[in-house]
Amino acid sequence: MSIKLNCDLGESFGSWKMGLDSEAMPHIDQANIACGFHAGDPLWMQKTLALAAQHGVEVGAHPGYPDLVGFGRRSMKCSAAEIQSLMQYQMSALDGLARCQGLEMTYVKPHGALYNDMMADVFVRENVMAAVAGFYRPVRLVLQATPEAETHKKEAQAVGIELAFEAFADRCYDDDGRLLSRSKAGAVHTRDKMLAQVQQLVEKGTITTVSGIELTLQVDTLCVHGDNEEGVRAIKAIKTMLAN
């Protein structure tokens, strides 16, 4: 199983600094860059793109709901037109800034509540897919790897887009293959559990859910978090694990 490492970066805003981007970037394959709605701003987007270029890292847009105060983690009731326009606005911003630095945005991964809503609500997912399909050139859409992957593939094929399926290194899974809610105990793994989950995924292509069920997942990319020093050390360990 060949799995890329992706990380959410570029989440600083103005004088407020978020994450350890310069420490994480050398060890990942893909940078999901905030586009200004939930985090980030034009200057930090430029800085993050330059850092990605320095380390040869693939770049993707990380659009969220327009919710700076809530860091994009609160759901919003949006119309079809609103979902598509907020997606394409943010994608276009990162795409343009990337081209100015000789880079190409190759994929889009929704952030936070928009990502969760996309996975849980067909209406939201249809319009996220429509936004990607309506972009002026092809880009991949990152979706969570779940037992419903074949259904999601058919939805994507119907609108002519390509998917990349994502797993999470540090999150516990519910029995339906979705992420266990952060409001529940054990939702975020300790370092040891995180590394064990990655090892299981690499060796067997499975994860073990909160109640002990083993699920097979098709995974193209693995999300890691580099917003603290322990997280960066974990990224290095995971990178070595995937390389062996």
Image: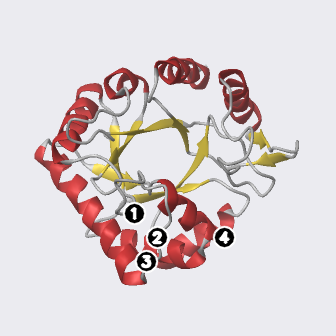
Question: Vertically, is 116 above or below 126?
Answer: above
Q: Badges 3 and 4: C-beta atoms under 8 Å apart?
A: no
Question: Vertically, is 239 above or below 32?
Answer: above
Within-10-Å neighbours for mark 4: few <14, some 14–19, many 20+: few
Residue matched to label 4: 151
What is the secondary structure assignment of the residue under circle 1? Answer: loop
**Residue located at (42% from left, 58% from top):** 140
Q: What residue type is labelled 3?
A: Cys
Residue matched to label 2: 76
- Label 3 and label 2: CA atoms lie apart by 6 Å
* Mark found first going from the N terminus, 4 or 1: 1
- Label 3 and label 4: CA atoms lie apart by 24 Å
Quadrant holding the C terminus: top right
Q: Which amino acid does label 1 sit on?
A: Tyr
Return the residue nearer the eye: 1 or 5.
5
Image location of residue 62, percent across then percent down: 37, 52
What is the secondary structure assignment of the residue under circle 3? Answer: loop
Q: Tell me, yes or no, if residue 175 can be seen here.
A: yes
Q: What residue type is labelled 2?
A: Met
Position of 204 compared to 163: left or right?
A: right
Q: Badges 1 and 2: C-beta atoms under 8 Å apart?
A: yes
Return the residue nearer the eye: 233 or 129.
233
Image location of residue 58, percent across then percent down: 34, 40
Q: Badges 1 and 3: C-beta atoms under 8 Å apart?
A: yes
- Label 4 and label 2: CA atoms lie apart by 25 Å
Position of 7 compared to 211: left or right?
A: left
Residue matched to label 1: 65
* Mark found first going from the N terminus, 3 or 4: 3
- Label 1 and label 2: CA atoms lie apart by 7 Å
Q: What residue type is labelled 4?
A: Thr
- Label 1 and label 3: CA atoms lie apart by 9 Å
